Amino acid sequence: MPARFERKEKLKQPSSRLNSTMASPSPTRPKPLPFSLHRGYIGRRTSIPCALVALGLVFVIFLTWKHADSQETNPSFYSFDIVNEFPHDPQAFTQGLLYQGNGALLESTGLYGRSTVRKVDLRSGKIGRFDHPMKDGWGLATDGKIIFGSDGSSTLYQLDPGSWEVIKKATVKYNNHEIPLINELEYVNGEVWANVWQTDCIARISQDNGSVLSWILLHELRQNLLRSGHTGIDVLNGIAWDEDNKRLFVTGKLWPKLYEIKLRPLTTPPFDGKIEKLCPTRGFR
Ligand SMILES: *[C@@H]1O[C@H](CO)[C@@H](O)[C@H](O)[C@H]1NC(C)=O
């Protein structure tokens, strides 16, 4: 089902009642003291230190407010900074990426039925052998207890690692609209991160209810590769989290590089944060 992003008009608050009580001031309210009286009472000598104290107070209030403000802000969009670049097999049509530990990644690749799961050395990009029982899937991730799975729809599955039975299903939604084409998954700090297929976007999904909590915008990574002449590259596809060293890796299909990145909060996202413009897929239209 295509997700639509209609802008909801903000409901106008009925304000007449509030206004009517505000408009009639209480007759018992005391008149404010004229400024000159204050000045006379404080005296001229103390007025400068008093002004300084007041200024200091205003400054402290400002700092407290700024601090509270910065703590409350939970940005919905992130850009990134590149921390490291590693070589990546430009023939690898990456489907999935998993950090295995000890500088090694597991990568699943596929194209025209040639799918492989390979062990990749992070530093050199060299490919080793890895035998596995896995079949093709869109995305899999685990928190160590349950398996999260995606099948290219807007459904996030929770599977039993023993029986592979579906324990729970959630619909991935952002601002009440379904997000289709949920692809490669990664479990990061209690959230499920998913690349939306054929976009440069990663959705950070609540594992409890499927809500998209925020977005990571990686447009510049692919654009930079294109600009530097790698015109044959395909879409972003591959997220790996190194839990021990808190390192985040991303790559894409037929990309010659694998990046270690760090998130940077965006206060003013492009397109006013309209996700159908930022992360366009077929389903958004
Ligand atoms: C979904 O869960 C997250 C916490 O993981 C919470 O912040 C959010 O409000 C929940 N959304 C809904 C619609 O229940």
Image (spheres, rainbow, N blue to C red):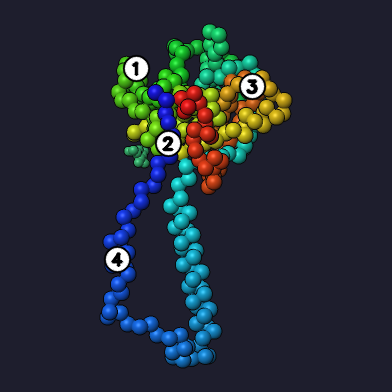
| Residue 23 in sight | yes
Label 4: which residue? 20
Label 1: which residue? 164
| Residue 212 in sight | no
The image position of residue 134, as x and y in percent, is: 45, 13
Q: Amino acid at mark 3?
A: Ile
For the residue labelled by badge 1, is the local secondary structure a helix, a strand or a loop? loop
Judge the density around disc 4: few (<14), some (14-19), many (≥20) Cα neighbours within 10 Å.
Answer: few
Label 2: which residue? 6
Label 3: which residue? 233
The image position of residue 193, as x and y in percent, is: 46, 31
**Considering only vertical position in the picture, is 187 above or below 234?**
below
For the residue labelled by badge 3, is the local secondary structure a helix, a strand or a loop? loop
Q: What separation in Å lies between label 1 and label 3 (alpha carbons)?
A: 34 Å
Q: Identify the residue at horizontal 40%, vertical 37% (top origin).
A: 175
Judge the density around disc 1: few (<14), some (14-19), many (≥20) Cα neighbours within 10 Å.
Answer: few
Front residue of 9/185: it is: 9
Query: Which of the 4 image quadrants contains residue 249?
Result: top right
Q: Identify the residue at horizontal 42%, vertical 36% (top origin).
A: 6
